[in-house]
Amino acid sequence: MSTIQIRIDDETKNSAKKVLDEVGIDMSSAIKVYLKQIVIHQGIPMPLVTANGLTPDQEKSILKASKEAKDGKNVTGVMSAKEAINYLKNL
């Protein structure tokens, strides 16, 4: 067996501990599960997301689209709800 030591800010540690306590698992066991999942998946076993719950690529795309809209680029006219749904289905 090996020992791993990590440094993490108190807020993150306490928030994680609260969640883990609610599901009945200690921090050490949760980290073991995470490391085993990395091995099984041969990579990070979940999508990495920003504070907004988006992947970095999704967030980048949204910010780019927002800037384009503000600049009047790639903007379509006003649509009805039905037109908007059809537009989104065809993306």
Image: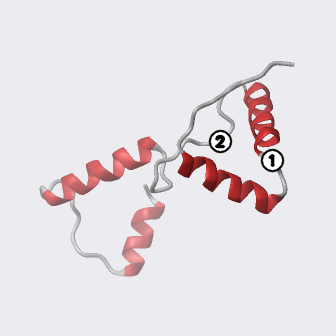
Q: Is mark 2 on a helix, strand or loop?
A: loop
Q: Which of marks 1 and 2 is nearer the N terminus?
A: 1
Q: In which quarter of the image is the N terminus?
A: top right
Of discs 1 and 2, which sits in the foreground? 1
Q: Give the colour scheme shown.
A: secondary structure
Q: Name the residue under label 1.
A: 26
Is residue 9 shown above or below 20?
above
Q: Residue furthest left?
A: 71
Number of other residues with Cα within 10 Å of mark 2, as a class: few under 14, some 14 to 19, many 20 or more: few
Q: In this view, does 39 lie to the left or right of 79?
A: right
The three-letter code of the residue at mark 1 reads Asp
The three-letter code of the residue at mark 2 reads Met
30 and 46: which one is in front?
A: 30
> Quadrant location of residue 52?
bottom left
Q: In this view, does 21 lie to the left or right of 45?
A: right
> Quadrant location of residue 81?
bottom left
Residue for point 62% across, 53% down: 14
Q: Position of residue 23 (x, y in %)?
A: 81, 59
> Which numbered disc covers residue 46?
2
Q: Which residue lies furthest to the top in this view?
A: 2
Q: Is mark 1 on a helix, strand or loop?
A: loop
Q: Is residue 69 left or right of residue 23?
A: left
